[in-house]
C-alpha cells in the first residue's frame, strides 16, 4: 500500500494545486534561512565596548552633576521623585560610589541606601538613566544600548572625581551596567555590588533558545515592539541583553578589590545561576572570591531588592547587609 502522504502529494502535483508545492518549499527554505540568519547575527559591537575615561576634579565633577540635577528640575517632563541625586561632604572623599537604578525605575528607589553610604563617609552619585523617570510612561521603549553605555561611562567619570576609591552598585539592568563598567573601566572601578543583575531572563520568562532571536528581532527593531503584562518593552529589555554580549572578553582588573552579588529565592525575572556565574568568573580571573548572598524565600522579596516598599519591612537590615557585602565584611 502506498503511503497516504505520498499519494496526496502526487495528487497535488498533478491537480489544480500543483503550484502549491514549490511555494511551500520556498516558504520552508526562507524560514530556515531566516532562522539561521538570526542565530548567526553578531551581537558584539565595537561601539558597545568603547569606554571614554575623563579625569575630573572634585569641583568639575560636582558642577557636572549639579548641572544635570538643575536641568532635570527645569524640565517639566522629569518626575520630581526621579531626579538625579548627589550627596557629598563638600570635599573629595576617601570613598565614592555610583548607584545605578534598574529598568523602568529611577534614582528615588536608592535614596535610603544612598543615605547609608553617605553616613559612612562616601560621596554618592545617583544619576537618572536615559528615557527613565519622565511623564511619558512609554519613553523607555525607545531606549538604545549605546545610550546606556554612554550614560554609565559619563556617570562613572563624575563619581571618579568625587573620591579616591570608587565603586559601583547596580540593581537589575543597573547591575548589567555595573558589570560592563567593571570590565571596560578597570582604571576606576575598585568595588562592585550587583543586586539581582539582569544578565539573562528566568526560563519561565523566556527559554534559553529563544533569547537570541528575541534580542535580534526586538533589540534591532526588526519586529514591532511588544509590552508585556509588567509594562516592560521587549525592545528595551533587549538593549540590556545586548550589553551582556558586550562585556569585556577578558575583564582583568588589577585594581578590583571586591565583587559581590545578591539574589532572591523569589525572583522570577532573572536567571539566578547566571547572576552569580558571571561575577564569579570575573572574581576568578582577578584572583579574588565573589561574595554572594541569596535572600531566603520566607522573606517574600521578589526582584526589586532596593525599593523600601518591596523589602517587607527589612530595608534597614538589608541595606546594612548590602554595604557589608560591598565593603567585603560578609562572606556567604
Image (cartoon, helix red, strand yellow):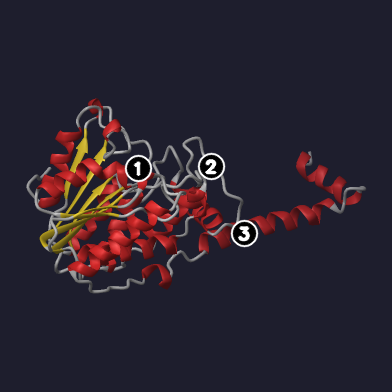
Instruction: Select label 3 or label 2 by which is in front.
Output: 2
Q: Position of residue 305 (x, y in %)?
A: 27, 39
Q: How many marks?
A: 3
Front residue of 202/311: it is 311
In the image, what residue occupies the spot 25% across and 27% down?
312
Front residue of 113/327: it is 113
Q: Are marks 1 and 3 in contact (CB under 8 Å)?
A: no
Front residue of 129/60: it is 60
Dot label at residue 81: 1
Furthest toward the front, the residue is: 74
Q: Quadrant of the N terminus?
A: top right
In the image, what residue occupies the spot 81% across and 47% down?
9
Q: CA distance from mark 2 to mark 1?
A: 24 Å
* 116 lies left or right of 4: left
* 184 lies left or right of 34: left
Looking at the image, is 111 positioned above or below residue 19? above
Dot label at residue 34: 3
Q: CA distance from mark 1 to mark 3?
A: 45 Å
Disc nearer the start of the sequence (2/1): 1
Q: Position of residue 211 (x, y in %)?
A: 47, 50
Disc nearer the start of the sequence (1/3): 3
Q: Which residue is mark 2?
A: 227
Disc nearer the start of the sequence (3/2): 3
Front residue of 86/323: it is 86
Q: Residues within 10 Å of mark 2 (few under 14, many from 20)?
A: few
Amino acid at each position: 500500500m502506498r503511503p497516504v502522504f505520498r499519494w496526496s502529494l502526487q495528487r497535488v502535483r498533478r491537480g489544480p494545486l500543483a503550484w502549491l508545492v514549490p511555494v511551500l518549499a520556498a516558504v520552508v527554505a526562507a524560514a530556515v534561512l531566516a532562522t539561521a540568519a538570526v542565530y548567526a547575527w553578531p551581537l558584539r559591537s565595537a561601539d558597545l565596548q568603547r569606554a571614554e575615561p575623563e579625569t575630573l576634579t572634585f569641583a568639575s565633577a560636582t558642577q557636572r552633576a549639579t548641572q544635570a540635577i538643575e536641568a532635570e528640575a527645569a524640565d517639566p517632563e522629569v518626575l520630581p521623585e526621579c531626579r538625579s541625586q548627589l550627596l557629598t561632604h563638600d570635599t573629595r572623599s576617601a570613598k565614592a560610589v555610583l548607584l545605578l537604578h534598574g529598568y523602568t525605575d529611577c534614582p528615588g528607589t536608592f535614596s535610603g541606601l544612598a543615605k547609608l553610604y553617605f553616613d559612612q563617609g562616601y560621596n554618592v552619585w545617583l544619576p537618572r538613566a536615559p528615557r527613565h523617570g519622565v511623564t511619558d510612561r512609554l519613553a523607555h521603549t525607545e531606549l538604545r544600548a549605546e545610550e546606556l553605555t554612554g550614560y554609565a561611562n559619563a556617570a562613572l567619570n563624575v563619581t571618579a572625581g568625587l573620591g579616591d576609591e570608587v565603586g559601583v552598585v547596580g540593581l537589575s539592568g543597573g547591575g548589567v551596567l555595573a558589570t560592563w563598567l567593571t570590565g571596560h573601566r578597570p582604571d576606576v572601578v575598585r568595588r562592585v555590588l550587583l543586586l539581582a543583575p539582569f544578565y539573562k531572563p528566568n526560563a519561565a520568562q523566556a527559554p534559553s533558545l529563544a533569547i537570541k532571536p528575541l534580542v535580534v528581532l526586538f533589540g534591532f527593531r526588526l519586529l514591532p515592539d511588544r509590552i508585556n503584562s509588567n509594562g516592560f518593552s521587549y525592545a528595551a529589555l533587549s538593549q540590556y541583553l545586548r550589553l551582556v554580549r558586550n562585556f569585556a572578553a577578558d575583564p582583568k582588573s588589577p585594581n578590583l578589590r571586591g565583587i559581590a552579588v545578591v539574589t532572591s529565592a523569589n525572583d522570577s525575572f532573572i536567571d539566578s545561576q547566571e547572576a552569580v556565574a558571571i561575577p564569579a568568573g570575573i572574581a576568578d580571573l582577578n584572583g579574588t572570591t565573589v561574595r554572594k548572598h541569596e535572600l531566603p524565600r520566607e522573606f517574600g522579596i521578589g526582584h526589586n531588592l532596593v525599593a523600601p516598599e518591596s523589602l517587607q519591612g527589612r530595608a534597614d537590615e538589608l541595606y546594612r547587609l548590602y554595604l557589608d557585602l560591598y565593603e567585603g565584611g560578609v562572606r556567604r
